[in-house]
Amino acid sequence: MNTKNAILIGLAVLAVMFFLYTLSVPRGTPTEYGGTTSQTQQSSGKASAPYGSQTNSEGTAEVVAQPRAPGTSTWTFSFGIDTHMGSLDMDMTKVAVLTDDRGDSLAPIAWDGPAAGGHHRNGTLTFPAPSSTPKTITLTVSNVGGVATRTFTWNAQ
């Protein structure tokens, strides 16, 4: 009877520890200063207000993206992925593309964040600036967390 009680107590302690761990994992979009914010809106593929963060939680990963103020030569996006299923081993510059309302596509020129691997990756994706300011921009992320494509669209003007 003592062994059975010890096993039950051990399982209860593990369950409580797991619950507390899941509460402590930060969620949301990375901020410029390395913190997180939970003020996100679900990505619906429709254009959102300028520079609001958007979240897509399909599949086994949550992806959060937010444009920073566009520059004259580059546009940057705060970008984060969280998963507890597998490892985030993708090259961030290969899974994202920026498209404007004219259909012009731009590939990222830099990823400033952790190297491939792990369950959490937050950083900055940098793209070359479009030749002229588009009405809308769409960030498409492919093959992350078992989802073929995720789209995030913002009004750019």
Image (spheres, rainbow, N blue to C red):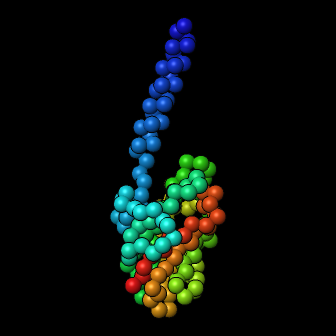
Foreground residue among 39 and 74: 39
Percent position of residue 42, x then y: 45, 62
Count the marks: how many? 0
* Residue sitting at x 38%, y 70%: 52
Please tell me whether residue 60 is drawn above or below residue 139 in the rendered image: above
Q: Is residue 26 left or right of residue 86?
A: left
Foreground residue among 54 and 44: 44
* Residue sitting at x 42%, y 73%: 48
The quarter in which the C terminus is drawn is bottom left
The quarter in which the N terminus is drawn is top right
Please tell me whether residue 156 is drawn above or below residue 48 in the rendered image: below
In the rendered image, which quarter is residue 17 located in? Answer: top left
Q: Is residue 91 left or right of residue 51?
A: right
* Residue sitting at x 47%, y 87%: 134
Outermost residue toward the top in this view? 1
Percent position of residue 45, x then y: 51, 70
Percent position of residue 31, x then y: 37, 64
Outermost residue toward the bottom in this view? 132
**Is there any visible trace of residue 53 in the rendered image?**
yes
Percent position of residue 10, x then y: 50, 22
* Residue sitting at x 55%, y 80%: 99
In the rendered image, which quarter is residue 32 located in? Answer: bottom left
Q: Is residue 151 left or right of residue 73?
A: right
**Is there any visible trace of residue 110 in the rendered image?**
no
